[in-house]
Amino acid sequence: MLRNDEQFLQKWITWYGGQLGRENLFVYFDGTDQNIPDFCEGIHTEKVRRIEGQVRQGDKGRIAFLSEAARQLFCEKTYDMVIGTDVDEFLIPDPALGIGLYDFLQHFQACGRVSISGLGIDVGQKMGEEGRIDWSRPLLSQRSYAKLSTRYSKSSVLFKPSDHSSFPQWGSGFHRVRGHNFHIVKDLYLFHFGSIDLERIEEKMRTGDLVAKGWGRHLAKRTRTITLVSKKKARDWNKLIPAARFLQNCVRPPYAWNKPAMFEWQPIVRIPQRFQGII
């Protein structure tokens, strides 16, 4: 579900449509005042009445809508698996495997879990080295640094439950599945691109409607990712990824037993070249 984010939507459709088939994509526009772009042809689109409220209240309304949409896909369209992401989030299996997202996920069909997660990769702009994003080019050919983030290790992939009387429900922002633990699988990553362009974030922060609804704090978090990426030394991907995955699978914050934690560790890594050109 999105509102006023066509640049990311076009990238989102290109990636997931190429991996899963455009006929299997479902995009909901938050507000009947939204225009559906021509590049959405061939996917399922729907304008819904705008979900009002401050950030937290709006997030709860949107995730309730999307959890119900997932239930309908399981029940009425006989899907075995449903992926939910924000428009700036991309589930990517490691290119070193040589397989696409569909083939990768098929290995987990009979895993017996309610959901699986990719490790959160929060991509940021390194100021002084990386300029403004050119949307006509692949994003990962223009951005080389990221924070390993518990916030974006989300329970994005749901499996159809064997007990049809109970369907899994996401928590706000896809950050968890209510009543269930999560499992971050090896070689799967959730790339988040909301922090890739400081000027874009600043433009959004000048939008009165967003600030009035409490989005100022949320957008400020994205600028902090840019600050960390710009100031901290990037470390080796191959050394830190296994450690971050292990910690996030084992450690929980005291306030949420089914969310990942890393003891406030915020490592910065350099994204390997094999990811360039993917998104």
Image: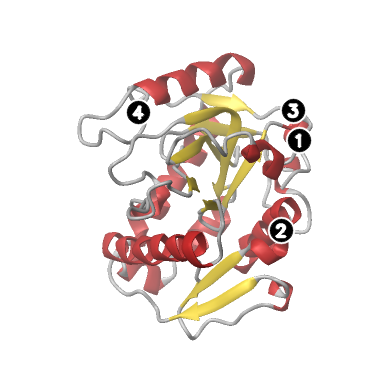
**Earlier-in-chain disc, 2 versus 3:** 2
Marker disc for residue 99: 1
Q: Position of residue 161 (x, y in %)?
A: 43, 47
Residue visible at 30% across and 61% down in the picture? 60
Identify the amino acid type marked 3: Leu
Tell me the distance, in whole angstroms, between the alpha carbons under discs 2 and 4: 32 Å
- The answer to whether mark 2 and mark 3 are in CB contact below 8 A is no
The answer to whether the residue labelled 1 contacts the one labelled 3, judged by CB atoms less than 8 Å apart, is: yes
Residue type (three-letter) at the residue carrying disc 1: Ile
Q: Nearest the camera: 25 or 15?
A: 25
Helix, strand or loop at label 1? It is loop
Q: Is residue 192 visible?
A: yes
- Dot 4 falls on a residue whose secondary structure is loop
Compare residues 44 and 148 and report the one nearer the observer.
44
Q: Earlier in the sequence, mark 4 or mark 1?
A: 1
Disc with the residue nearer the chain's start (1 vs 2)? 2
Disc number placed over residue 17 in the picture, else none: 2
Helix or strand or loop: what does disc 3 sit on? helix
Between discs 2 and 4, the one toward the N terminus: 2
Camera-nearest residue between 61 and 58: 61
Report which residue position mark 4 lands on: 261
Q: Residue furthest top?
A: 239
**Which mark, by number, is residue 53?**
none
> What number of labels is visible?
4
Sequence-wise, the earlier of marks 4 and 3 is: 3
Callout 1 crowding tier (Cα within 10 Å): few <14, some 14–19, many ≥20: few
Instruction: Return the x and y of residue 250 as percentages of the image width and height.
Output: 36, 21
Q: Do labels 2 and 4 touch, CB within 8 Å?
A: no
Place residue 130 in its image quadrant. top right
